[in-house]
């Protein structure tokens, strides 16, 4: 299968939040539909917590996750095509990635067949489209990005062949808007805890634990460091954030919070102080 080379790099389906029509130039005039395919689904909406997956999937402690994932807010233009008889998902993959390439889209990550992991996970946990659940050996995924009018735009396609021989191609164009989580639920952290004991005794963790007791829906937890002034600081903070993310996951499970009740992401912030903040998922 012809696939753009991979450059690099807890999931749940994203939440739709009201209709937001995109400029026609973002999708309709740029990406041609697959010839003779049936448009099975079309969405033009503002979304929160859209999953941008840029690494392979793996299972850790029974939870399927990716090493590199972001949950962003913005505008989504989505089209799902049911391919005509005689046309394969492989052809559709090459058709759409070829268009991305002509548009100057920079490849971020791609996978195919078993390297993509479980098709069921992509269909139901990432895209929330059950009919995309197909054969693991007949799937492919591509993610690329491009700056359009000063905004980051992600171009994505996922193609798959189902057990009933139907073949589908999903095309998402996601324009990043607001990227920060809802700050109504946040706690200041003066320094990033580097041990379980330091985390457990922190005010931020105590408040977060209380939040789980007040509602039953899952939380998307963001651990945000203070800003960095140099490249070396970014590297150091990234390592500390990765360590804290692992500590936080282990401590929550130790305190009886099931792994299906939360997802964790971490970012190097742009403020003079760090935070742990969270938002409720559906």
Image: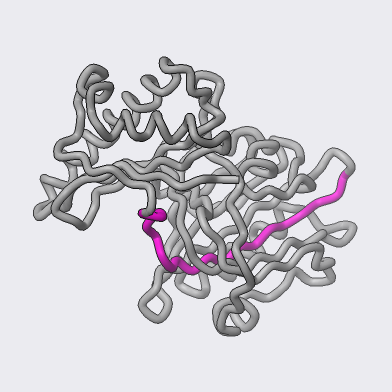
Q: Decide: is 50 above or below 219.
A: below
> Residue at (39%, 29%) from the top-left corner?
209
For residue 237: magenta?
no
Residue lying furthest front: 214
Residue 221: percent from left, percent from top: 41, 40
Residue 264: percent from left, percent from top: 41, 37
Q: Decide: is 2 above or below 47.
A: above
Q: Decide: is 273 above or below 10.
A: below
> Residue at (70%, 36%) from the top-left corner?
120
> Residue at (49%, 39%) from the top-left corner?
219
Q: Residue 114 sits in which quadrant?
A: top right
Q: Which residues are magenta?
A: 165-183
Camera-side residue of 200 and 15 = 200
Camera-side residue of 254 and 140 = 254
Residue 149: percent from left, percent from top: 40, 81
Q: Quadrant of the C terminus?
A: top right
> Residue at (58%, 38%) from the top-left corner?
116
Residue 126: percent from left, percent from top: 61, 45
Q: Decide: is 9 above or below 210.
A: below
Q: Is residue 26 left or right of residue 181?
A: right
């Amino acid at each position: 299968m012809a696939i753009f080379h991979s450059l690099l790099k807890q999931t749940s389906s994203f939440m739709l939040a009201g209709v937001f029509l995109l400029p026609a130039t973002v999708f309709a005039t740029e990406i041609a539909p697959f010839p003779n395919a049936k448009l099975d689904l079309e969405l033009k909406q503002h979304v929160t917590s859209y999953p941008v997956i840029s690494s392979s999937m793996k299972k850790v402690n029974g939870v399927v996750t990716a090493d590199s994932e972001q949950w962003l807010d913005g505008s989504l233009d989505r089209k799902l095509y049911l391919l005509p008889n005689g046309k394969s998902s492989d052809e559709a993959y090459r058709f759409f990635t070829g268009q991305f390439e002509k548009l100057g889209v920079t490849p971020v990550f791609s996978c195919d067949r078993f390297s993509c992991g479980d098709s069921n996970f992509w269909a139901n946990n990432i895209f929330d489209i059950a009919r995309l659940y197909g054969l693991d050996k007949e799937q492919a995924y591509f993610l690329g990005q491009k700056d359009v009018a000063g905004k980051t735009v992600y171009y994505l396609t996922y193609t798959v062949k189902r057990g009933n021989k139907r073949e589908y191609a999903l095309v998402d164009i996601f324009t990043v808007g607001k990227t920060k989580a809802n700050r109504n639920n946040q706690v200041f952290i003066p320094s990033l805890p580097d041990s379980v004991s330091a985390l457990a005794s922190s005010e931020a963790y105590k408040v977060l634990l209380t939040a789980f007791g007040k509602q039953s829906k899952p939380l998307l937890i963001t651990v945000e460091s203070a800003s960095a002034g140099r490249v070396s600081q970014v590297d150091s903070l990234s390592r500390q954030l990765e360590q804290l993310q692992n500590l936080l996951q282990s401590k929550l499970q130790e305190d009886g919070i099931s792994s299906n009740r939360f997802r964790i992401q971490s970012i190097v912030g742009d403020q003079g102080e760090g935070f742990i903040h969270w938002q409720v998922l559906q």
